[in-house]
Amino acid sequence: MIFLSVEAAQQQTASKRPSNSTPPPTQLNKIKYSSGPQIVKKERRQSSSRFNLAKNRELQKLPALKDAPLIDREELFVQKLRQCCVLFDFVTDPLSDLKYKEVKRAGLNEMVEYITHNREVVTESIYPEGVIMFSINLFRTLPPSSNPTGAEFDPEEDEPTLEAAWPHLQLVYEFFLRFLESPDFQPNVAKKYIDQKFVLSLLELFDSEDPRERDFLKTILHRIYGKFLGLRAYIRRQINNIFYRFIYETEHHNGIAELLEILGSIINGFALPLKEEHKMFLIRVLLPLHKVKSLSVYHPQLAYCVVQFLEKDSSLTEPVIMGLLKFWPKTHSPKEVMFLNELEEILDVIEPSEFVKVMEPLFRQLAKCVSSPHFQVAERALYYWNNEYIMSLISDNAAKILPIMFPALYKNSKSHWNKTIHGLIYNALKLFMEMNQKLFDDCTQQYKAEKQKEKYKLKEREEVWHKIEELAKHNPQVIPTAECQKTPQPHPCPLWNIHITLFQGVGSGNETVLFISTLDICRWTLRNSYFFVCVVCSIKLMVPSNTLPVSLFSKCIP
């Protein structure tokens, strides 16, 4: 009968749901909280979930567990657990039932101490009662988000939204965590009560805005994952589902950093060789997480997970780096700096054989970063040349890398607006010169030759346009087409009264092309390179798609 009551409690709450190395800490570890009730600076930042308040909230203080005879302690423990299932109002009337709130708080605190410092107190009858008490107090409808648009949380500027009922919730979490960590805890007994429905309800709470609650949830879920082998695959699958909704639907979830921190520890314990399921998780979940706009909230934990995978299996390096290049930010410079940070972490663990596969697209992107007008992006990219391992990889492949990087380095050594960047670029060029003087000189000569070629092409283009303009100036006649006869009056041009000369047989066939002044050609061909437009009658005539205006009209010049 007790087992049925657990199921009923879980169904009721579910219907209301809206290692060896340590992963990077989530934001909670940077915020100091006292053990007592929290003082909230702004009332609007305090919120509370929806609880089903008990009708009879008059609690009677029970005897202390330590004073009870040993034979009566188990029954008294159960009574205290049931008494703590009574819920109170902390929002609409926070001053109500203060006496009974204190009775519950004292009872929870006593049970935490009791289960922590005593052995053989977690008996079989305690399992269902403890799970029911936890479920009733914690599984609830979360309050509406105070930040529904999903803008990034700034820990230096924004205050976290705190749960008003935290004085009781904290002790419930403490009790359940000590319950799971107790030496007397038997997973084989507890698995009847801590099942898939329980885990699903627990995962729903990760969207809480209170960072203290998410930190407890993170620890509890990790303990459950470690103790209940039969739930591991289910937990990973449900976390994947949360990530999928976050990436492709909502782009808003408060617990992504905590879930990634849990996964960092899980990935660290994966057996080798990696299962295909785990590789797909990396490609289909972790890499797309880089494209979400709120990346800064969870990026340290995400980068840790990615690097853990590469340390497990170096063959994943190529798809990971190509995935990062695919999602590389185009206009968000702070996000680009995060990508550069993660990329350096990846290069620190990359195998030389894998580096060869990705070095060309990788350094093409780094060349763009060096050329970035945002000095932090350029600066972060140039710091790669201070990394000894990366420099050893570059040195072994300088013949491929230097020709890619040299134009960006040489150009920005003089043209970049930031003097700090000048110094970093000179340092990079000096290192390249020391690696291979002959290759450096060859790249210098090739760069100068390319610049001369560009100048020659620009001069040639200007000469052609000048010839076209002169041809238009010395052409006083208009040979109108049938369509142009609709408007025989001259076109009002500020330079010349006559603009249009008809040419036959220009191009690959017998196309009819309208010869328009330089001003009009520029105006119209920028819009659509497939059409010229008669400035008199606005008739569009199509030109061969493989014919550019300059080459087309150069054929028309006598």
Image (spheres, rainbow, N blue to C red):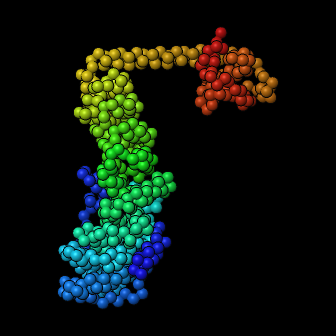
Residue 334 image position (x, y, % from top left): 37, 45
Residue 554 image position (x, y, % from top left): 61, 15
* Vertical arrangement, residue 420 with respect to residue 182, above or below: above
* Vertical arrangement, residue 261 with respect to residue 448, above or below: below
The residue lying at 54 percent from left, 15 percent from top is: 463
Given residues 58 and 120, the one toward you in this image is 120
Quadrant hosting residue 190 = bottom left
Residue 423 image position (x, y, % from top left): 26, 31
Q: Is residue 248 left or right of residue 528?
A: left
Outermost residue, front side: 188
Residue 188 image position (x, y, % from top left): 33, 68
Figure label count: 0
* Res 525 visible: yes
| Quadrant of the frame with the C terminus | top right
Given residues 39 and 538, the one toward you in this image is 39
Quadrant hosting residue 39 = bottom left
Quadrant hosting residue 412 = top left
The residue lying at 25 percent from left, 51 percent from top is: 21
The residue lying at 43 percent from left, 40 percent from top is: 323
The residue lying at 38 percent from left, 45 percent from top is: 335
